[in-house]
Amino acid sequence: MQLSDIDVRELLPQQGRFVMIESLKYIDAIMAVTTTRVEEDNIFVEDGALTEPGLLENIAQTAAARMGYICKYVDKTGVKIGVIGEIKNLVIKRCPCVGEELTTIVEIVTDIFSTLMVQCKVNVNGTVIAQGSMKISVINH
Amino acid sequence: MRLKDDFFRILNVNADATEYSIRLNSEHSIYHDHFPENPITPGVCIIQIVKELVADNLACPIFLQKIAKVRYFKAINPVETPEINVSLTVSEQSGKYNVSATVFVNETVFTQLSMCFAPTGEG
């Protein structure tokens, strides 16, 4: 199974217009990478740019896609709902414009007790536009 | 997407704009997708709500430059908890705005936020 064959919607609990990543490019024990082109019809696009909540959700969903991949293809269980537990020391340089492609990289710091802590970075054309750290927690329903 | 008067509306604000009570619109399309059959207020939307309250308060467009720390202690279900309170402290430093905010209902704290905004165009 190639990563490029996977529809990210299968890996995320978020659906419809709240999906903020386009494709999962790379995954291993310590990191995950997604790419996403900013589309005009994204709900968080305003005046031709993806606003802060869209950018932050893109980061969170990159981490969530990794969790979803492991649930679905490694543990063979259903995709669980994860929510942001904490965001820390996260700097945004600018909001990406419609048409630009985001490369979002999350590196796992810790992955214990249903909580994933990641260092994250969003690049556009090789330049970092946002970076910081985030915690994602799985909630049980 | 502007969330005010769509995703949420202001029910009440005190005289110095430091305490808001707001109502979440549990019928909003965001809640259909986040998550299907299980509406939870997206953490990023809580950040956006605070940003919009601060921008209206300052009467100028702002950009979120830095999140020092945002902690989500408890998820907000808009059906169970449609009305929430937001307390805000805004201080200006070298042309930027440091914002501390707490989202709560009575004794329950849902989210604590510490963020820095810059006026748009100077980011």
Image (cartoon, helix red, strand yellow):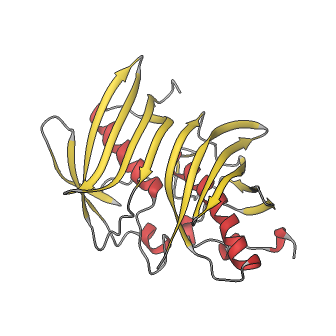
Measured along the vertical axis of the image, is residue A5 above or below residue B76? Answer: below
Measured along the vertical axis of the image, is residue B109 above or below residue A132? Answer: below
Measured along the vertical axis of the image, is residue A101 above or below residue B122? Answer: below
Asked whether, in this view, residue A16 is left or right of residue B14, the answer is: right
> How many numbered marks, from 0 up?
0
Q: Position of residue A100 (x, y in %)?
A: 71, 46
Q: Position of residue B100 (x, y in %)?
A: 34, 37
Judging depth in this view, the residue of A105 and A6 nearest the camera is: A105
- Image quadrant in which the N terminus of chain A is located: bottom right
- As drawn, which residue projects farthest toward the right? A2
- As drawn, which residue projects farthest toward the front? A113
Asked whether, in this view, residue A9 is left or right of residue B71, the answer is: right
Judging depth in this view, the residue of B116 and A139 nearest the camera is: A139
Asked whether, in this view, residue B56 is left or right of residue A60, the answer is: left
The reply to whether residue B38 is in sight is yes
Residue at 35% over, 73% down: B27
The reply to whether residue A40 is in sight is no
Q: Position of residue A117 (x, y in %)?
A: 61, 53
- As drawn, which residue projects farthest toward the top? B94
Residue at 72% over, 71% down: A69
Residue at 39% over, 53% down: B46
Q: Which corner quadrant of the image does residue B43 belong to?
A: bottom left
Q: Which corner quadrant of the image does residue A16 belong to?
A: bottom right
Q: Which corner quadrant of the image does residue B15 belong to?
A: top left
Q: Position of residue B117 (x, y in %)?
A: 44, 32
Judging depth in this view, the residue of B39 and B7 nearest the camera is: B39
Residue at 14% over, 42% down: B14
Measured along the vertical axis of the image, is residue B117 above or below residue A61? Answer: above
